[in-house]
């Protein structure tokens, strides 16, 4: 028992990736147990480790936390990534919930049947380009500071960078229209803890390929 | 401008109902603007009132809040329904996120195609009875107090009552195996602000009908 948080999930991004980002941005070292086969999940379910029989699960501070947002809220509060007061927090929450919605589209893309993929992709990118990124471009412009909210790094910044980099993997030309998002991306990527996370060998997970998807389907379905 | 929060949504439960429950439990009076036709939504979108072009939206304390969880978090914090410290808060968050997941199943039931409805319903009620309600039955039992978390009413209690009542509308005996949830339901329903919300004439919305659904589809899907 090392005292470090331990993440339980499969070896891929999925619903655990924002958690990895938040811990890394907070400079918190963590360990990971990867589910490789269905029995790994069943074992956790049988020994009562998973409140609703699901992962993500994070062992931290003597607790076994489940539910992505509950874990993210806890980590953000504990490591001062959640703003300085209720006013800042509600802005962070609004922004981050929009990001979770966009991320949900990304998560569901991977499992679309082949004949639906193209249309789904177009809709997904359309939402990124026309619903979500214009909002964050405008927030940065109007707020006029280095961060989305207040005067210090918050989970909103970390989660936005995560989303920007994911979209870049699919359609980098989208950002031509968003100069402030471009400078935000450069600036945030240079924060030492985040820079470290972006380097090869970190615990950041690569985009899911077909092998990962197959494995996940076997474990969870 | 009355100073009361104003809710913008269609005249039905959907993703706004949890917000109504939280405000009502906190004893906060609120007003509602109902979207009746597509133009009502378009107007809000065009005048910049909706951060991501979507409702729910709640005008409160000089802000136009969107995103169900952001609104619920704000109201819960402001009206002391979010526990007394971080430890209580993370328990509340875990429970409430499970409740949101079950609620999502209920929300999506209504829009299932006719040939999928029966299987979907069975899966939905199976999750309620085998994944979610057993957890809350055990939490109440192990915690041994009147509330799910700590020693006072929190959003977890309010949202659980909301979910229990919805599940019972689908399956009246859904709590048959959960005696502790049955007494929880009776006890929380008797809290004055909640009792009032449960009475006819309150702003609580009835279950959605096919007509409501058709109207909402016209507004949101065209």
Image (cartoon, coloured by chain):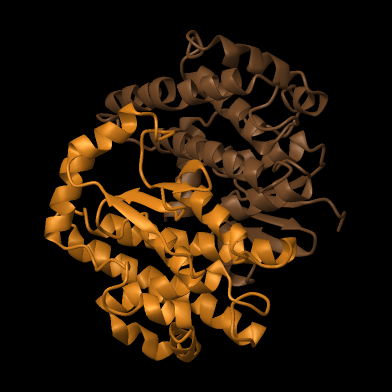
Chain colours: A orange, B brown
Identity of the residue drawn at 25% across and 66% down: A121
Q: Position of residue A110 (x, y in %)?
A: 22, 58
> Considering depth in this image, is A2 or A45 the residue closer to the camera?
A2
Identity of the residue drawn at 31% across and 27% down: A46
The answer to whether residue B100 is left or right of residue B87 is: left
- Report how many numbered discs are placed on residues in the image: 0
Residue B53 seen anywhere in this rendered image of the structure: no
> Considering depth in this image, is B152 or B208 the residue closer to the camera?
B152
Q: Position of residue B28 (x, y in %)?
A: 81, 41
Residue A15 seen anywhere in this rendered image of the structure: yes
Q: Position of residue B114 (x, y in %)?
A: 29, 30
> Considering depth in this image, is B23 or A78 the residue closer to the camera?
A78
> Considering depth in this image, is A207 or A81 the residue closer to the camera?
A81
Spot the residue most to the front: A1
Spot the residue most to the right: B2
Task: Determine the image quadrant of residue B45.
Answer: bottom right
Identity of the residue drawn at 59% across and 46% down: B10
Q: Which quarter shows the C terminus of chain A?
A: top left
Task: Determine the image quadrant of residue A102.
Answer: bottom left
Q: Position of residue A73 (x, y in %)?
A: 56, 54
- Residue A47 position (above or below residue A132): above
- Residue A110 position (above or below residue A170): above
The answer to whether residue A107 is left or right of residue A63 is: left
- Residue B79 position (above or below residue A166): above
Identity of the residue drawn at 24% across and 56% down: A11
The answer to whether residue A1 is left or right of residue B158 is: left
Task: Determine the image quadrant of residue B157.
Answer: top right
């Amino acid at each position: 028992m090392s005292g470090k948080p331990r993440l339980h999930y499969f070896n891929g991004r999925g619903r655990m990736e924002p958690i990895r980002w938040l811990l890394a941005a907070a400079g918190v070292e963590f360990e990971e147990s990867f589910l490789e086969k269905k029995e790994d999940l069943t074992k956790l379910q049988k020994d009562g480790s998973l409140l609703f029989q699901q992962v993500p699960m994070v062992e931290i501070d003597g607790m076994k936390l489940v539910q992505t947002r509950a874990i993210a809220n806890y980590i953000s509060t504990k490591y001062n990534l959640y703003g300085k007061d209720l006013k800042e927090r509600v802005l962070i929450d609004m922004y981050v919930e929009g990001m979770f919605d966009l991320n949900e589209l990304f998560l569901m893309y991977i499992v679309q049947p082949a004949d639906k993929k193209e249309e789904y992709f177009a809709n997904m990118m359309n939402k990124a380009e026309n619903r979500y990124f214009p909002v964050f471009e405008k927030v940065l412009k109007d707020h006029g500071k280095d961060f989305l909210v207040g005067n210090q790094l918050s989970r909103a910044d970390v989660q936005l960078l995560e989303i920007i980099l994911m979209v870049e993997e699919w359609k980098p030309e989208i950002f031509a229209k968003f100069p402030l998002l471009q400078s935000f991306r450069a600036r945030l990527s240079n924060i030492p803890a985040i820079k470290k996370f972006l380097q090869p060998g970190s615990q950041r997970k690569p985009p899911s390929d077909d092998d990962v998807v197959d494995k996940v389907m076997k474990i969870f379905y």
